[in-house]
Amino acid sequence: MTILALEQLSIAFGGVRAVDGINLTVEPGVVFSIIGPNGAGKTTLFNLISGLYTPQAGRVRFAGEDVTGFAPDQLARRGLSRTFQNLQIFYHMTVVENVMVGRHRHETTGILSELLHLPSVARQNRSTRLAAQAALARVGLAAEAERSAGALSYGALKRLEIARALASEPKILLLDEPAAGCNAVETQELVGVIRAIVQGGITVILVEHDMRLVMNISDRIHVLAHGRTLAEGTAAEIRSNPAVIEAYLGIHGSQEAAHAIG
Amino acid sequence: MNVPTLIRHRLAPFAALAMIILLLPFFFPSAYYYRVAALVLIFALAALGLNLLMGFAGQVSLGHAGFFGIGGYATAIGPTYLGLPSWLSIIAGAAVSSLIAFLVGRPILRLKGHYLAVSTLGFGLLVAIVLNNEARWTGGPDGMSVPRLALFDWSIRGSDTWYWIAGGTFLLGAILARNLVDSPTGRALRAIHDSEVAARVLGVDVARKKLTIFIISAIYASVAGSYLALFNGHITPDIAGFLRSIELATMVVLGGMGSIIGSLVGAAVLVVLPQTLTALHDYEHMVLGLILMGFMIFLRQGIVPGLIRAFARMRT
């Protein structure tokens, strides 16, 4: 069964076709990577899938349901969560409170009981906090729970976003350049985190520039260039695809390209 | 419960606040101080509501005196023309304010930053214009007198009584605000403040949450406006004017955005300072302006968060 399917998905900004007739299907329980040179439309595609942009043509199907044009919060409530390339942290909150917001779709208390702090709210707060702490433990941030979010390092903030998205118990997790700005150690930790997420039954869709990470972890790779599909296949297929090397890294010269991908 | 557990209880600061409100009158040299303190508490209630909107949810309103005015005129028009008792007029005013907040909030809360600020400003101006022009109901620019609040045949007019009513209501408002901040909705609102887009992809219905807090903050302002009108016994459209809106927003920012006690401190400064500065005659407003600028330069996060931070630094 397919968990996510894009059919002829398209959007243009002022005449530039940022995403142009993309078709792809993602099977559940895999790491599905989307790569391509800068400006290929990767983040635009993410924004379309997560509902931040409304496609001008084409359809998005999520777990069998047509969700084209759904708002991000509607998609989140159906089990689609994401992180951001440029961090979107709640800096006025503590680390654990950030992740508690991720539990929002599972919280059931009403505004009146919240104003009166009825026992149901106290119970809800306790169970939300426990679930948030469990999500923090999954990314190795359990010890930082009570710190202010702004006090964390860049690499830790990247993992905080993942914990926050995980706390919502998504079916699909979109990771937008999780390794960008991370050092080698942090990237290695990230590989472990992503592997554990997939083993937990969550489908991961990854946009990433770190080719070593992508080749290492992906079950399937979808290559974009100028908003269109260039190729799709396993890591081995993509690595040996001459069109990919040509278009994706050709400008750097084939030698450098071979070095980067190899 | 032993003493340390009690001190760490989530409502412990409010027990302290209750003690302060209870004990403060022992230090009042004259009845005039009751009047000033009651005014501080009434404005603090309105500022607290606005702080929930601005400080916690991060949505600016420069028209909140509009709700202040609606609440105030409800206690004037209700008893005078509609035969409602004053206490019921307070509730009716709050109901009207929440309905208007719902209708106005839906379109304008989509806007952000300066655009939202200008639209709320427009709303406030609109209320002031209506209050000025509908002279048949409001008495026009001269305003109208407000019948005294009567409870069980007991007519409330003394400043001391109003001090206790306003103090009790502010305390209740502060506890409700604290409860809200510590709840799922409160976390969602604080999340919206920092990153709307992240809140949305986590399943927060941002438009609905903003509308909820806009309505709640309107109810705070409306009740405070009702109290002010009943306390003064007279009301003019100035209550809903642009300067009032700015004053409320200044209280929030001065006391500390997102600080419940900050709303009280901000209101205290802006109510008490002009009273004490009258001795300076012509220079009153200049000195007031300089003091406000000084506060903002040296305690940028507002008086309460700024002082808390300064004390934390001193201890380390």
Image (cartoon, coloured by chain):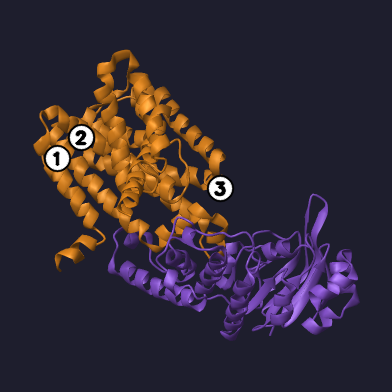
Chain colours: A purple, B orange
Q: Amino acid at mark 1?
A: Leu
**Which corner quadrant of the image does residue B46 belong to?**
top left
Left or right of B52 on screen, residue A17? right
x and y, in percent, of residue B286 in the image = 37, 20
- Tag 3, which chain? B
Q: Amino acid at mark 3?
A: Arg
Up/down of B309 relative to A162, above or below? above
Left or right of B195 on screen, residue A118? left
Q: Provide the secondary structure element on which disc 3 rests.
A: loop
**C-alpha separation, residue under disc 3 versus residue under disc 2:** 38 Å
Up/down of B222 relative to B179, above or below? above
Q: Earlier in the sequence, mark 2 or mark 1?
A: 1
Q: Provide the secondary structure element on which disc 2 rests.
A: helix
Give the quadrant of the C terminus of chain B. bottom left
Q: Mark 2 or mark 1, which is nearer to you? A: 1
Left or right of B261 on screen, residue B134? right
x and y, in percent, of residue B314 in the image = 31, 49
**Which corner quadrant of the image does residue B90 belong to?**
top left
Q: Provide the secondary structure element on which disc 1 rests.
A: helix
- Residue matched to label 2: B37
Q: Earlier in the sequence, mark 3 or mark 1?
A: 1
Q: Are discs 2 and 1 less than 8 Å apart at CB? A: yes
x and y, in percent, of residue A177 in the image = 67, 67
Q: Amino acid at mark 2?
A: Ala
**C-alpha separation, residue under disc 2 versus residue under disc 1:** 9 Å
On whether disc 2 and disc 1 are found on a single subunit, the reply is yes
- Residue matched to label 3: B110
Q: Is residue A167 visible?
A: yes
On whether disc 3 and disc 1 are found on a single subunit, the reply is yes
- Residue matched to label 1: B24
